[in-house]
Amino acid sequence: MSTPPPTCWPTLSYQDAPGAIRFLVEAFGFEEHLVVPGEADGEVVHCELVWPEGGGVMLGSAVRSVGEVEATKAGQASVYVVTDRPDELHAKALANGAREIRGLRDEDYGSRGFTVADPEGNRWSFGTYRGA
């Protein structure tokens, strides 16, 4: 059985959403797809970042001046992202300020990956494991 194309997009909140967007693009290689600014300076109502290997994440400002959806607390997410380039991505993430949580390593179930934290404390795990 193979995994179907991604239809689940994690959604995160940040105190500094514009800074988070820059970090995720520069440190991990996400690609900016859509950014909807809010009414307040530096506010992001909605952002979609595409993962070049499939799927993506959405994010926004933790404090919003308008909107129906109450944001989650910043810095409390944990996201797993599949990559065929864990070694390259690990070096890039650390070079761009990610804080290492679990170093690059091979797992007994066949994956190679690592875990880092972004500047607001969200944990990002990257690995070759694609699921069942």
Image (tube, grey):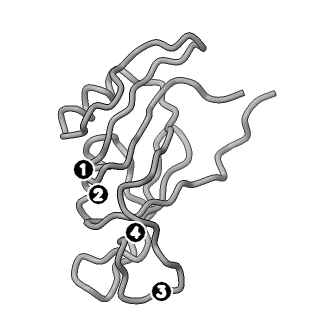
Mark 2–mark 1 contact, CB under 8 Å? yes
- Estimate how packed mark 4 is, as few (under 14), some (14 to 19) or many (20 or more) residues with alpha carbons within 10 Å: many
Residue wearing tag 3: 67
Q: Earlier in the sequence, mark 2 or mark 4?
A: 2
Q: Residue 126, how many percent across, how many down? A: 44, 32
Residue sitting at x 48%, y 30%: 83
Image x and y of residue 19, in percent: 23, 60
- Report the number of discs: 4
Q: Which residue is mark 4?
A: 60
Q: Position of residue 27 (x, y in %)?
A: 27, 41
On the rendered structure, is 58 left or right of 44? right
SS class, disc 4: strand
Could you give the CA–CA distance between mark 3 and mark 2, rounded to whole angstroms?
Answer: 20 Å
Q: Earlier in the sequence, mark 3 or mark 4?
A: 4
Kindly identify the amino acid type of the residue bearing the numbered disc 2.
Answer: Ala
Q: Residues within 10 Å of mark 2 (few under 14, many from 20)?
A: some
The alpha-carbon separation of the residues under discs 1 and 4 comes to: 15 Å
Residue drawn at x 41%, y 77% is 45
Q: Which comes before the other along the chain, label 1 or label 4?
A: 4
Q: CA distance from mark 2 to mark 4?
A: 9 Å
Contact check, label 2 and label 4, Cβ < 8 Å: no
Quick one: 113 or 27, which is closer to the camera? 113
Q: Which residue is mark 2?
A: 20
- The three-letter code of the residue at mark 1 reads Pro
